[in-house]
Image (spheres, grey):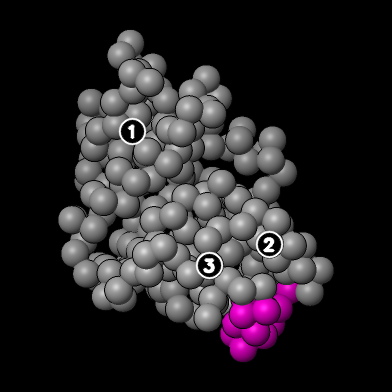
Amino acid sequence: MNISIVIAQEEHFKYAQIICDTIETSALLRGTGIAKRTPEYVQKKMENKDAVIALDKKGNFAGFCYIESWQHGKFVAHSGLIVHPDFRNLGLAKKIKTFVFDYSLKKYPGAKVFGITTGLAVMKINSDLGYKPVPFSELTSDPTFWSGCKTCTNFEILKSKEYKMCLCTGMLYDPAEKPKDPPKHPFNVRIWNRLKKIKQALFLENKDELIKLYKKLNLIS
């Protein structure tokens, strides 16, 4: 796979539109909710060197991901992870995620790294990197982060649950915690599919119920 992953900057502004289009098209095909991005927003991330981009040797866009920081760098999130259809099934998503994960730990030392997603592939990658599933209450409380969900088709669900629960799963990596090697509960697609169905049916209303469910499915100890 002759693809380079680099920190995005001004010279990559020309890819902003195709990045946004690829993210939106992918979400529509999966039938999942996703917060929309604009080319201007993506370019701002590139300007601040808070994004990474994957390109093949001809300069064709292959993949992308960007970094958000919250509460003065206490929390960091990776968003907009996408691989262009022409470059899928090559393991590129995991390479991009690993690159941006390592880069964000250097740029924001000590920050807790978190994400919310409905994508099983992203959940598996996160799990392999040491993330664990957590209730939304353990993620950033910065209202700006949650306001970014307004363009998601599931935003009304999130709002109705007072930002404590949605169809997304929250995952967190805390660098202060000693990672388990190997993970105590390796990622299991069947279990996560079951979890998604339960969440869709019940819309758990509080942290205690969510923790109880995670323990029942052996996702946390």
Residues packed near mark 1 inside 10 Å, few (<14), some (14 to 19) or many (20 plus): many
Q: Quadrant of residue 168?
A: bottom right
**Secondary element type, mark 1:** strand
- Find residue 202 and report its horizontal and vertical position in percent: 79, 74
**Secondary element type, mark 2:** helix
The answer to whether 212 is drawn above or below residue 22 in the figure is below
- Residue, disc 2: 191
Q: CA distance from mark 1 to mark 3?
A: 31 Å
**Secondary element type, mark 3:** loop
- Viewer-side label of 1, 3: 3
| Highlighted range, magenta | 203-216
Inspect the image, locate mark 2, and give the three-letter code of the amino acid beneath it. Answer: Ile
Asked if the magenta segment contains residue 153, the reply would be: no
Looking at this rendering, what residue extends furthest in the right direction? Answer: 201
Q: CA distance from mark 2 to mark 1?
A: 32 Å
Residues packed near mark 3 inside 10 Å, few (<14), some (14 to 19) or many (20 plus): some
